Amino acid sequence: MSRSDCKQNRDPLQLVREGTSREERLFPALDPGYAPVDERAAAHHMVFAQAYSAFLNYFNADNVQDGDWQPFFSGDVSVQLALAAVQDVDAYRIRIKEYLDFLKDLNFQSDEAKAKEYLGYLFSAAATLARQFDIFQAALPADLPLKSMLQALLQSQLALALNRLISYYKADLALPQPDSLIAEAAPDLVVLGKSAVTFAEVYQGGLTGEWITDGSADWAAYTNGVLPDASVYGSGIEAYQRINHIATHNLFTSALDQFLKAYARTAAEAAKGLEASLTQRDDHQPHYALFLTFLRLFAYARDGANTLTGRHLDFYYRIILQLKEKEARPGHAHLLIELAKQPPEHLVLAGELFKAGKDALGHDAFFANDRDFVANQAQVAALMTVYRHGSEKVGVTAPSSLQQGRIFASPVANSEDGIGGELTSNDKSWHPFHNKKYQDGTLAKIDMPKAEIGFGVASHYLYLAQGERSVTLSFQSQPTAARDFKDDVVCLFSSEKGWLEKAPVSFAQETGGLVLRIDLSGADPAVVAYSAKLHGYSFATELPVLLVKLKHRDDAPFAYPELEPVTLTQAGLTVEVTGLKTAALSNDFGPVGASKPFQPFGPSPVANGSFVIGSGEMFQKSLTYAQVNVQWQSTPAPFNGASVSVVTEYLQGGVWRQYKTSLQADVTSTTFDLLGEPQSADAPPYSDAPAPPENEQFQTSSRNGFVRLRLAADFGQSDYEQALIDYIKRVTDSDPNNDGEKPVAPTGPYVTGLTLDYGAQQTIALDQADRGKFEARQALFFHLDPFGYAEQHPYLKSTVPAAIPSMTLLPQFKHLNRDDPKLPKGVPVPHEAEFYVGVAGLVPPQNLALLFQVVDGSADPLSIKPKPHIDWSYLQQNEWVPFGHGEVEDRTAELIDSGIVTLSIPRGASSDNTLLPADQYWVRAAVKSNSDSVCRLILVAAQALQATFEDQGNDPAFVGGTLHAGIIAKLAQPDADVKKVSQPFASFGGRGKEAPADFYTRVSERLRHKDRAIAQWDYERLVLEGFPQIYRVKCLNHTQYEPDATGSGIYRELAPGHVTVVTIPDLRLAALRDPLRPYTSLGLLDKISAYLAQRLSCFVRLHVRNPLFEEVQVDCKVTLQPGLDQSFYEQKVKEAITRFLSPWAFPGGGNPSFGGKVRKSVLIDFVEELPYVDCVMDFRLLHSYIDADGNARTDEVDEAAGSTTVSILVSARKHLVAAINPAEEETPGELCRCLA
């Protein structure tokens, strides 16, 4: 099955509809004044009396018929004004439009006679208006403003318009009768009390001088001077073509439009003048004044009778159905309580009142606490964020893989740059989980510091003072990526002047696990004990530290995703040293200095003479080998070349011991082994215990930490002396047998240089949760976290049962699954982001009520918010422990709405942590994905409660109003325990009593849908009634719309059982994240979904979504009017195009609608008509959308239309408009397309 079948399909028979807007809910017939019993006003009665009086005979004093009564009811100025005021301008407008629409449709060619008749009707309507205006204005008194207004209209506009019509009429008269286009006909219209007449009657009968535009003496001379104008008929051969041409010609239609506007204005001004004549004029005739008085009094009876429809509606709704308007809903306010210093806690009872100023009537207003609240001394002290970036591309050029998995950390989350910079947004808002900066819809950068992530080891084995030093850290772990991570980490050793930074030789997978190797040269300084003051980080150790941090490289991805899953069972630390020069040296005569040549066995080496070597660095480690290297001034030579051995012995328990296999070497050797197999495995020649690395001299009280080189025999000094005596005696005795050579004195050991070489290995067990082994540990393995560190040991984890049990190489940003049914229980769930709240002054166990004030609608409307989304936990001994069920009350809909999150902090929470700053209790809100699905924050504050307005006979308008921030500042009854009450933000949720019109609409809809969502009509009305924030709703049956972050995802118009509801917010009430794309907030979508879910069939799969916005972009070149600033007006053109395509994004621009089309020709005309544009060239219209296969496309089109039933066309964020100079319009060699 293809993707288009599974995830994308279209219904060719789908009904194209706009959905329902808020205005369309209002059914006109529900208005009590829609069908009044008597809808006539006083003006209608005046006109009726005038007409009716013509049928009443008048008898004079002699009782003789003398005309009728019309003169009594026609002469008053009010009658003339009433006649104009009651004109049905809409009926005239509709009739004119009907005639024009018929003539503009070329299908009328089959009924040419009717076309000529309709064209005659158009000429007749304008001529009739001209005659009636002429008569009407002449009859008005000179002091009436309407008269002067009409005269001005006649002279400035209508006379010229009639002149054009006469020229067109005369051009038609010049044609032979069969070819004439204008029929001498009049429509069935009554204008200003008279029936319509043909154009010929007015043309021949004439009008007054106000209509003569050329100063002619009379009407006949004027009409004779008007020249025929046949240009409006075009050059068509057939009559229907010429009739269509004049009906669509703007000169002809504009003339008709001028008469229509004058007609409408006259009626409107006459209505105003009539009211003024009734209330301000005192020149009415007595008999007519009595009639007007009667009409005024009759209005009361008429108004009473006209309440019949409303009373009938109320009778049914209110009496029969027993329904009534919704009562006013009081508003709520979030308040913060600050206690005085002395009380640790204070109970604010439910119903306790807070002063809220005064209402419009001057009465005191009060808000009451919703429920019992125990305030305490806890306050928010710090806000921090850790964010792990996903696959979203950062910037334009860099590959997305470079940032994927990179971790950022903000020590000051509520700042512009994550480190304390002042917030620059208008609302001073910030995101709790990241600080992404977008530009033109693209993620430009992540404005947060890069996180320090790594691990470290503290061990006495790292006392490495001199020489060539090699450190190997090996981990027993499962296989990792088969590559060397040496370029992804940096190694730091604690040295005398701070951290010594070294690049590793290798950091790669080897047999058995991951191995890190670092070499230090003889030129590198000594590795010394860690000092918090010197090295920072505040590690709880005084041992030397090796710190391994992940590098944030610009040319390579962050290594954390590859190393994150590495779990450990054991770590091994191996050190090898060559050329250690510092040692404690002594012999049988006392300490020996190695700074100059010395005799290790004294000036006269004797048997069992000793040379003692001590090293605080070497002998506190579990040695794998050790040797001493000597440089002889001259090779030792015992007397007569005797062989003298040197035996190595070690000090254990204050007793010199030999190794099980004696270590002996000739005295002439330059290397002597210092380590062998001890007599007892429990008594090694080293202590393997942390100790200061100072080299103490051997004393009789020394217990261990020394080796000695003992001479097995002397150098024959006494033999030499005896031989020398014998030799001298023979010489002095002149013994003839004295033929021997003079004896050679033995050469004793004389050392000019001495160094130590050794290797040592330490095992760090990470798989045994035994307390004894933990307390006896001699090395620390810890994680370096973004804001601290945490020692890692199985025993520490075992003390916190909820902790993730596995030992890992790097810090983990995870929690154990409890609530997500899609995942197994207890499986670690990685986090995309974590938000930390540090609280000072808390004394667990206590409740912590945190106010989260969000920016409504600031969550990404395209993201899909998981359920559940936020995992809450607290810090206990450097381990995050989830809150138990019932310990978290979240009234923010997981940071979608402003509200209070109440946390029950248990006794186990600790403040002496190292993972985050100490002396604070820490709460974590973590999300595994979709961190954009929460709103930006303005404030996080502790000691929050919610209060509700309590009506105590206050002004009804106060209930539905908004109480501005800062009004509530004190209790109604002061309490010494409460230092301060504050209202940081305006009240919310208040609504006045339901208006009658809304009541009638709601009840009417309720009687139809019966509070059940079955038909499309039901869904749309239910949403509009339940959510005043929504302006338009569109329901799509058998449609499945589940977009992903790209706008693609699933879109099926043929999906039985699925119903999709798409909403557009009311722009007057919404704070839009993107004005060009009016998205409904995620929180509101969730509420709508929950609202409808209670009212629909259990077999329906509901989807409440935002529309699919499809961009329309313009690419063109324009030439500006001469002298204009090119850069400025180029931007003005872009702004004008954006306003044209998305008018709702600007004040007074209306609301968006589904579907719609944008034609290239219309846009070209719009741009050309801009006053600062001279001409437009190379115009392209680009439409971006998701095709039927789910792929994003951008096509050049002549007409852009929504690709789906949920699509709305919107302006692109940027238009490609280039202003060019006139000289650039034609490129050399460029030809017009028609000539190419």
Image (cartoon, rainbow, N blue to C red):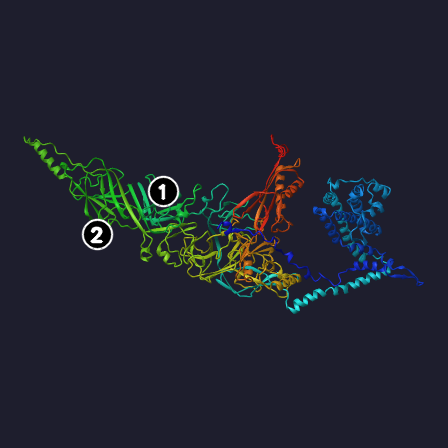
Give the residue at mark 1. Answer: 504
Give the distance between the C-alpha atoms of the residues marked 1 and 2, in whole angstroms: 38 Å
Which quarter of the image is occupied by the C terminus? top right
Q: Is residue 66 above or below residue 620?
A: below
Residue 605, how many percent across, how many down? 17, 40
Secondary element at image label 2: loop
Q: Hey, which residue is sitting farthest left in the picture? A: 736
Q: Is residue 866 visible to the viewer in this orientation of the structure?
A: yes
Mark 1 or mark 2, whichever is nearer to me: 1
Quarter of the image for residue 1174 reads: top right
Q: Is residue 1171 above or below residue 1084?
A: above
Secondary element at image label 1: loop
Residue sitting nearer the eye, 969 or 909: 909
Residue 501 located left or right of residue 1095 = left
Disc number for residue 680: 2
Q: Is residue 1043 visible to the viewer in this orientation of the structure?
A: no
Residue 98 located left or right of residue 347 = right
Residue sitting nearer the eye, 79 or 768: 79
Residue 582 located left or right of residue 1007 = left
Q: Residues within 10 Å of mark 1 (few under 14, many from 20)?
A: many
